[in-house]
Amino acid sequence: MITGELRNQVDKIWESFWTGGIANPLTVIEQFTYLLFIRRLDERQLLEEKKSNIAGIKMGETYYTEEQSRFRWNSFKNADPEVMFQLFTIPQIDAGNLTAFEHMKSIGAKAGVFAKYMQGATFMIPTPKLLSRVVDMIDQIKMDDRDTKGDLYEYLLSKIASAGKNGQFRTPRHIIKMMVDMVQPKKDDTICDPACGTAGFLVAASEYMHTNHEDWFHEKSFREHFNSDMFTGIEFDSTMLRIGAMNLQLHGIEKPNLIGKDSLSEDNADIREQFSLILANPPFKGSLDYDSVDPSVLQTVKTKKTELLFLGLMLRMLKTGGRCAVIVPDGVLFSSSNAHKQIREELVENQKLEAVISMPSGVFRPYAGVSTAMLFFTKTNSGGSDKVWFYDMQNDGFSLDDKRTEVAGSNMPDIVERFGKLEDEVERKRIDQSFLVPVSEIKSNDWDLSINRYKEIIYEDVKYDPPLKIISDIKQLDHERSDALKMLEELLK
């Protein structure tokens, strides 16, 4: 949980960027991230130097030569603003003809996954004064443990206040946490988000393990799995890829597998039956031409709509027995096009669809007002859906306007508890907030998965006065109004 002090420090840095001329939230986060990375590089080399001096052994990984020492955080952080700015903007001939920023870009994968995706990064801090001020404020932040570093970055990411390109927007962290709590990631899982953005789902899965299974980290084999092949994120936006990489690293995942490609393209056609768990909120309302989509996905669902294509992609990427929790727009549940029916039939008839959770339309404000739902399914390729669990979420713990202020009565703990005990749902009636629906009934309704198709509503009789009584009451009100007007006229004479 982020502390008030840390929150205030981040707020002041954010404000300095804005007053210093950088108004785009993603640009602020990127520039902030670059400076955080340079600080971490120096801290890591200082640690290696300390180990080397104490043990009297050769240093491990180094990121700075002696000639490049002026690029180190502890070297330039106290420099005059003009001198510091020149280190970032003017190539230093005796330091490989690099700037401090270009040096950071040149380090490559040896410094972790973030540095691997630095191609195309641009230094955009416009003045010496702003650079010096921000460096000084970042230096004052205590970042001596994983929780603090992770909380800092999550709070920073929460400041993205407008939708990104191509339908991207940040999934609320409490929604992500609920989905992760429901699927309960396992020790040997290989977890993927094929539209990872800032890597929120992957981070939440890692935090679930730290919170619920800290004993797993005592085992060397698990730590190696956790830090190398457990987490995979795919993202075509290079800015989001860098931000996601830093988010993962600051949460203690040093070597996740991040892929800078379009998940739906043929470039990723080789990713098949590779993951045991997929967590995702893929782009909505996009449209792609058939020739730009991997043909194997089109075999599952022939469409140009990205939300349907991603469902087909996830089925291809999952191992048999693999699980998926995904957010989809409401239209996926009930739209009558052949493609919509095709993907719903696939999930219900050929796979094991376990749950459909409808969410209120304000959940993604202020980014978007679209109505959404969650689907939970297991890839079987042999059916297995007997009954599907429906839940009508009415309160996610926040107001449904653009302010999204915290409110009481969240349904989310109840959803997690009920999903973990589906055997207790058998007796629930269709008038309840959750209930089970037989697959045969879903099939007879054209594979419709909207909860309103199956929920029963009890209408209460409302008794009104007879029409003559209502007319009499209106006449009485008119009479009283007329008397009041006459009284006002008398007072004004």
Image: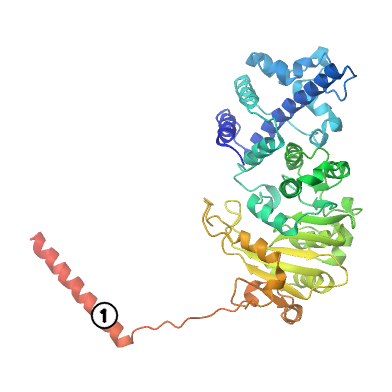
Does residue 207 lie above or below 82 as drawn?
below
Q: Give coordinates of residue 265: x percent, y percent.
A: 85, 53
Q: Give coordinates of residue 383: x percent, y percent.
A: 84, 73
Q: Identify the residue shown where x is 80% and y is 19%.
A: 50
What quarter of the picture does the C terminus occupy? bottom left
Q: What is the crowding at mark 1: few (fewer than 14 residues within 10 Å), some, or many (at least 20)?
A: few
Q: Identify the residue shown where x is 72% and y is 81%.
A: 441
Does residue 453 lie above or below 63 as drawn?
below
How many labels, in total?
1
Q: Is residue 296 visible?
A: yes
Nearer to the camera, 67 or 17: 67
Q: Identify the residue shown where x is 22% and y is 75%.
A: 478
Question: To which quarter of the image does residue 258 belong?
Answer: top right
Q: Is residue 281 visible?
A: no
Residue pushed farthest right? 270
Does residue 166 lie above or below 25 as drawn?
below
> According to the image, label 1 marks what residue?
473
Nearer to the camera, 442 or 83: 442
Q: Give coordinates of residue 152: x percent, y percent.
A: 65, 36
Question: To which quarter of the image does residue 68 belong?
Answer: top right
Residue pushed farthest left? 493
Q: Is residue 475 left or right of residue 263?
A: left
What quarter of the picture does the N terminus occupy? top right
Q: Amino acid at mark 1?
A: Asp
Q: Give coordinates of residue 420: x percent, y percent.
A: 71, 64
SS at badge 1: helix
Nearer to the camera, 38 or 432: 432
